[in-house]
Amino acid sequence: MYINNQVFLKSKGNVSLQKSKSILLKDIIEISAHKEIKDKIETLNYTINAKNQEYILVSIIKIIDFIKENVDNIDLVIIGKTDVLINFKNSNNSSTDRYKIIRVALVCILLFVGSITAIVNFHSDVDMKETHSIIYESITGIKTDRPLLLQIPYSLGIGAGMSVFFNHIFKKKINNEPTPLEMEIHSYQQSVDEYRKNETHGPQ
């Protein structure tokens, strides 16, 4: 039950919007209030002069002033973060997406070659071939330079181990846990957002 027309506001923190799109308050903040008041606030158009900026920091104080100018007799309560970082997406990205497949292919080739180089160098440093030969001879009593019964499962195991580590088999995830790559991307994005917030002066 809401008392005295209370309206609870919570910043969405970081949002991505099209520059050409009209920014509604519901796009940048979460609102909890009586349905009539909530619908009115959510559909308010918030004007931002972004010019050629890729992102902009909006202070929740500015949003409060804007709401009070357009809605009377409400009691605003702020929850959580006090700013909204808006990242603007380029609406005309057809030219950049044209070469997306080529860029992805080049990155995949570089990663593939790099991974092979790292694995080969590691096995060369520790003399894995000799190690397999010794293990094979210890188990079977047969000396050979090509212990395929060990080398083939070991090679397959490297691929299986990488799939388990990255929690992916092609497009499917093994479980719902975030992958190490997703964690790194998340940490990187948080660092970028923090930097942008600290870099931005004079919230709009």
Image: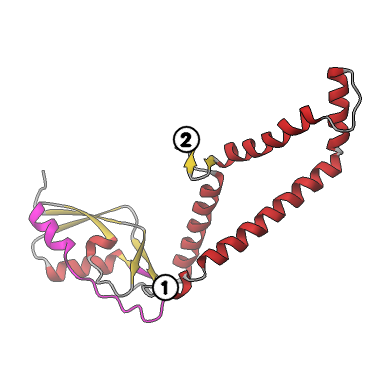
Q: Which mark is residue 175?
A: 2
Q: Does the magenta stretch include residue 37?
A: yes
- x%, y% of residue 27? 27, 62
Quarter the N terminus occupies? top left
Q: How far apart are marks 2 and 1 (CA)?
A: 34 Å
Q: Residue 94 carries which label?
A: 1
| Span shown in magenta | 35-58
SS of the residue under disc 2: loop
Amino acid type assigned to the residue bearing label 2 in the image: Asn
**Which residue, as the protein is rendered here, is positioned at the far right?**
143
Amino acid type assigned to the residue bearing label 1 in the image: Ser
* Image-based side of 23 in relation to 187, left or right: left
The structure residue drawn at horizontal position 51% and vertical position 66%, both measured from the top left corner, is 100
Residue 112 vs residue 175, the one in the foreground = 112
- Of mark 2 and mark 1, the one earlier in the sequence is 1
Quarter the C terminus occupies? bottom left
Q: Do the residues labelled 2 and 1 touch (CB within 8 Å)?
A: no
